[in-house]
Amino acid sequence: MRGLLLLGALIHFGFSALLTLSVDEAHYALYGQHLALSYFDHPPLVGWVQWPLVYLNAPDWVLRLIPQACWWLASVMAWHLAETLRLVVPSWLSVIPQGAAGRWAVIAILVAPVMHVLGVGLLPDTLLLVIVLGIMQTTLHLITANPSVFTPPTSSSICHSPLKYWLYLGIWLGLAGLSKYTAVLFAVAVAGALVINLGWKVLRQRGPWLTVLIAGIMIAPVIIWNARHDWVSFAYQIKHSSGGLWQLKGVAVFVGLQIAAFGPLIVAIIVGLVKFLRQQPNRVIWGLLLFLIVPFIVTAYMAGGGRTLAHWLAPAWLAAIVLGANPLALHWQQGKRKALAIMVSLQATLCGLAFVMLFFVGVPSLSAQHPLHQKNPLADLWGWDQAGQLAQNLAQQQSLKILTVSNWTLASRLAWYARPLPVQVLDDRFDQFDIWFGNPQKGQSTLYVNWSQVPYEPPISAQQYARCTELDQLAVVRLGRITSQFTYYRCEDWQGETK
C-alpha cells in the first residue's frame, strides 16, 4: 500500500510541475499575495497557508507541494481512522484482519478521480480533507470512553472525557471555519454525532462550551473583515447558494456527477454501510455518518437550484470512505470480490485515461481544428505563464500600468502570472478583483487581453473604450498542436462611468 501512495504522490508531483495554475488555484494564490483577514468569496486559510511561499516568490510546483501534502496526510489519516473504527465494532474486530480496512480506505481514495484534482490543486476543499478527518477522529475520542475500544456511553464516561479533546475539537472546527463557509455543515454533523451517542446531558459539561469558545475565537478574523466590508461575503454566499428555479432534475444530475467524480465504489460503500446498520444498528457509525448525510442533503438541495460543483462534497465522501472501508473489507473477506474488483479496475482505468488526456491536452488523435479541441476545457491549464510574461513585456513597451479582461476567470491567472500588474475586470459582477484593483477610470488606457477558449469582442463602445488596437498574439503549443491563443490590444480612453 505504501507503493500505491508513493505512485499517487509521484503522479501528483509530475503534473504539478507540468501544468499552470487553474482558475481557482491562481485566485487563492493571489490571496497569499494580498494577505488579509478574509476575502470576498472565501475565508482566508487557503491564502494564509500559501503566504510564506508566495512571499518568497516560490514557483508553482513548490506551491503545489501543499495540496500534495494534504492528500498524502488525508490518506494516512483515513487509514488510521478506518482501522480505529474496526476496533469500535465488535463484529468487525472479530472478522476483519488488521490492516484490511485501512487498505480499502486508501484504495478508495486512490481510484476516486476528484481526489486527485484536490491532490494537485490547492482549494479550500483540499484543506478540509485533512480537517474533516481530524474532526471525525476527535469526535470519536469524545464518544468513546476509550479511544481504542468502544464502551456504551454513560454519565461517567462523559465526565471523564479528557478536556484536551474538547480543545482539539475547537481547533479543528476553527480551522474548518477558516477554510470554507460550508464547513458549518460539519459542525452540525459533530453536534448530531455527540447528541446521538452522549445525549443532551453532554451540554452540562465544560467541554462543549470550550469547543465553541475556541472555534469562535479562531473564526473572528472572518467576522471582523466582513463587518468592515458590509458583510459582503455572507450576502454573496446566501445569493450564491439560493440559485435559480429549483428542479428535481438538477438533483438527479448532481447524483450522476457525484458517481462520475468519485466512482461507483462510493455506491458500494453506501450499500455496505446501509446493510451493516440494518443488521447491527450502531450509534457510533450512525453518528459519524452525519458527516456525509448533512453535507449531501444540503448540497443536493442546492443542486436543484443549479448551484453545485463536483468537488464540494469531497470531504464528505472522504468521511464516507473511512466509514465504508470496513464493510468493503468484510465483503472482500467473505469472498464476494468480483463486483469490487470490477469497480476498482474501472475507476483506476478512468483515472489513468484522465491523466493521459491531461498530458496530451485532450484526445491525442484530434487535430487542432477539431471542434472538440477548439473548445477544450483542458486547455485551461496550459500557457498562462507565457501569456502573463508577454503581457508584462507589452505593458512595459506601451507604458501601460493596468491590464484588463472581460471575465474574472481570466483575471485570476493573468493577475498571478503578470504580477504585480493590476488586472481590472469589465463585467458588472462585484468580486474580489474590485476590492484589489478597482475599476477603470475616465480616460484610462489599458492592455486588454483576450483568450480564444473564452472569447470576447474588444471592449469598444460609448460606455467602454473609445478605440482598441491589436498589438500581438500568442499561440500556446503543446506537443505540436495549438491548444489556445491569446490576443493583446491597446485600448484607450475609457468612456464609461467610474464606479
Image (cartoon, helix red, strand yellow):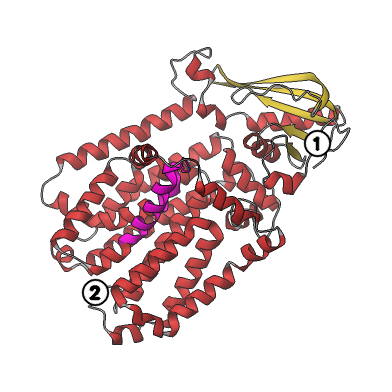
Quote the CA–CA distance across marks 2 and 1: 62 Å
The amino acid marked with disc number 1 is: Ile
> Dot 2 lies on which element?
loop
Image-based side of 181 in relation to 103, left or right: right
Q: Which residue is denoted by mark 2 in the rendering? A: 150
Q: So how many labels did they put on this image?
A: 2
The secondary structure making up most of the magenta span is helix
The amino acid marked with disc number 2 is: Phe
Whether residue 475 can be seen here: yes
Q: Picture quarter containing residue 400?
A: top right
Which numbered disc covers residue 402?
1
Whether residue 160 can be seen here: no
Sort mark 2 into few (<14), some (14-19) or many (20+) by Cα contacts within 10 Å: some
What stretch of residues is rendered in magenta? 289-315
> Dot 1 lies on which element?
loop
Q: Position of residue 165 (x, y in %)?
A: 42, 76
Q: Position of residue 255 (x, y in %)?
A: 34, 41
Q: Quadrant of the C terminus?
A: top right
